Amino acid sequence: MVLGVIDYGIYIPRLRIKAEEYIKVWSRFSARGVKEKAVMDLDEDVMSMALESAEQAVEGVDLRDVKVLAFASTSPPYSERLLSSFLVEGLGLNRNIFTSEHISSTRSGTEALISCINNLKSIDEGLGLVVVSDSPSASMKDNLEHGLGASSASFLIGFGDVVAEFEGASTYVAEFPGERFRPRGSDRIKDLELRGYYLDSFHENVSGSVKLLLDKLGRKSSDYSYFVIQQFNGVDPLRVALKLGFTINQLKTGFLAPILGDTGACSALIGFLRVLECAEPQEKILIASYGSGAGSDALSFKLTRKPGKKGKVSKALNKREYIDYLSYLKLKDAII
Amino acid sequence: MAYVSIPLYKRTIPQRYKLIGLKCKRCGWINFPPKGICKGCKVSSEFEKVKLSGKGTIYSYTVITAAAAPPEFSKQEKSGGSYVVALIELDEGPRIVAQLVNCKPENVRIGMRVESTIRKIYEDEGVVRYGFKFKPVEESLK
């Protein structure tokens, strides 16, 4: 039976900060191509965003049918303890559910999606829920901090009358030490500012997973109407995608880093949600995530029908309230 | 909403995360938070669990400003300068006290339609306490 995305949910915190606010303070803004980004309020965190998007994804379904839950984030509030239990309780899911948690790199969002799909296939009935929520943080003094945004995306996976049919996935992993990392005990990501080296890693891993998937499915890049790539900033991922033979037309719909920033584990999946609302039946969608260290997952979907409840994504993207850099520092716990 | 021990907090999680109330089997009154004896008929102790819609109306409100915030909310007060605490009449009947978010104090009005949202209420002993706050339903801001 056809397996794929049945419904979805999105949560984007309403606060935004513009690149100009950084320029006023630092005389520069280091996240290339990012014009503004989403910022969590003081009382929001990865888990609260996750519950908000997950609630939308399961709206109207019999919660007893949800058999698998996969959660992903690079920046959950705890390094040790179960995180999925919060979602099981908050949503009212069956306590006999199998849960998995994917938390070590920005690739974790697609890891969760693939893991949920595979687990559901092995049960061969019911529904799976994928909840991805992220808000990476870094030192305020670090260039890496400038682009970091926040958001959450959830997917209800199931059999039968799907919105987007899952066609296959491939993964590529290659050791690249010294790229974006977060040492044990720290809540701030770091890097060594070796841009060329990171781009080499990004290119090798993303092209590795994408080429493998295209070969597996007997496709070429032009068979896809949409390509959604991991977006750690608003310029470099596009250049890598163009080098791989994709066009701006395939990329632009799912490319949200310019208005959301780097949303970590959510990055490619938020773009995928946007595409789900814009695509026409039969159009194919290719997704490629990336996580430092490094690895990439590529996933292929085909839109089978328009989503029932339209406009969730554009509504979330359009709800905005702008803040200045001083307010941002307060929210990031930097000065109070 | 002030400090509560973890075991007590754990017992009230169904209310805090998803607004589970008790409906009286005798008179139909919705009790939130749960009561031993129904607040409506003051007789029955037979209830069924119901999930409340999270929709309601502002019955009254107050603005907490500098120095008035309890210690667990002082960061919030320092960050925003002030915050709103409202008495909300839920569509199912109960009136509850909660913070109001996504709305400046000067824009709050009695009768405003609101809906629940999950937020971090405060953090104590390294444990994040989550719970409901309310935000204006979009139409009520126009």
Image (cartoon, coloured by chain):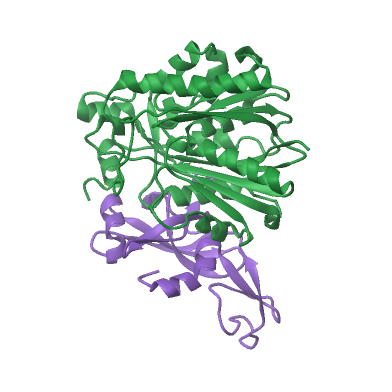
The image position of residue A166, as x and y in percent, is 67, 32
Residue A137 drawn above or below residue B136? above
Between A66 and A278, the residue placed more toward the observer is A66
Residue at horizontal 37 percent and vertical 28 percent from the top:
A176
Residue at horizontal 24 percent and vertical 23 percent from the top:
A28
- The tint of chain A in the picture is green
Between B114 and A201, the residue placed more toward the observer is A201
Residue at horizontal 35 percent and vertical 30 percent from the top:
A147
The image position of residue A242, as x and y in percent, is 49, 12
When asked about the image quadrant of residue A189, the answer is top left
Q: Is residue A59 left or right of residue B95?
A: right
Query: In the image, which lettered chain appears purple?
Result: B
User: Taking the image as drawn, is residue A327 in sight?
Assistant: yes
Between B21 and B84, the residue placed more toward the observer is B21
Q: Residue furthest front?
A: A175
Residue at horizontal 64 percent and vertical 68 percent from the top:
B50
Q: Residue furthest bottom?
A: B43
Between B133 and A49, the residue placed more toward the observer is A49
Residue A101 drawn above or below residue A151? below
The image position of residue A159, as x and y in percent, is 74, 41
